[in-house]
Amino acid sequence: MWFRTAPYATPGISLDRFQTVGCHAVGTNSVFHRPRWDSLLRGRGLPIALALAFQLAALARLDGYLNGDAVEYLDRAARFVEGHPPDPSTSRTFTLSAFLTPLFAVARALDIEDLRWAPWVGRLLQMLVACCLVDRSRALTSRLFGNRSGILAGWLLACSPLLHRWDTSIVSGIPSALALVMALLAWLPSENK
């Protein structure tokens, strides 16, 4: 092709890393480069999308009331925003309730009294945390055992019925697992250093 000939080549730039699209040369590291599907399978996009699809299916099947833990976490967050200190005699920590307090602080600042939306927003936050857990677990396993193991771990966790049993409920297990994985990622040496 005409742009691969010597008179048109830019000195110091190898033309081997360029792909031809139509009659233009597009670098593989350019802004216009689109990832291939196999790179999405190896990366983080599809496991998170699969986890989100399972979460939406579980959310559509929800029936009935919240579990007792979720009610307690939401009630403690609402009471904290109203000015009541956390009760030290409860067996559950205040961490998840503290994670939910911004919901009630915004509702109080906007003078919203009907809080029927709070459990749904809490569930959506829990689903977001579960998607982050899938991605960060993939990253941790990749760092410990290699990229293929990380891919497998991401796919297995994204398809886990145990994860999707609890990722639409407001419980502390999934945020605790994410905190543990993030702590391990911060503690382990990175390959880039």
Image (tube, rainbow, N blue to C red):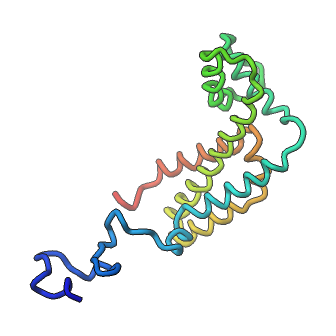
Out of 159 and 55, give the one closest to the viewer.
55
Q: Position of residue 67 (x, y in %)?
A: 85, 36
> Considering only vertical position in the picture, is 1 above or below 15?
below
Residue drawn at x 66%, y 10% as measured from the top left: 83
Residue appearing at x 79%, y 51% in the figure: 58
Q: Confirm whether residue 146 shows in the render.
A: no
Farthest residue to the front: give it: 23
Q: Is residue 68 shown above or below 169?
A: above
In this view, the residue in front, 174 or 7, is 7
Q: Residue at x 13, y 76 (%)?
A: 10
Total labels drawn: 0
Q: Is residue 50 visible?
A: yes
Determine which quarter of the picture holds residue 189.
bottom left
Answer with left or right where residue 100 lies relative to residue 57.
Answer: left
Q: Which residue, as the protein is rendered here, is positioned at the far top?
A: 83
Q: Quadrant of the N terminus?
A: bottom left
Judging depth in this view, the residue of 132 and 15 nearest the camera is 15
Vertical comparison of 80 with 65: above or below = above
In this orientation, which residue lies closer to the viewer: 152 or 167?
A: 167
Q: Quadrant of the C terminus?
A: bottom left
77 is higher (above) or lower (below) than 52: above
Q: Is residue 191 left or right of residue 80?
A: left
Q: Residue furthest right?
A: 64
Q: Position of residue 28 (x, y in %)?
A: 33, 72
User: What x and y, as percent, mark residue 159?
Assistant: 72, 62
Please provide percent x and percent y for residue 107. 65, 20
Relative to 192, is 115 on the left or the right? Answer: right
The quarter of the displayed image where residue 123 is located: top right
User: Residue drawn at (14%, 80%), measured in percent from left and top?
Assistant: 9
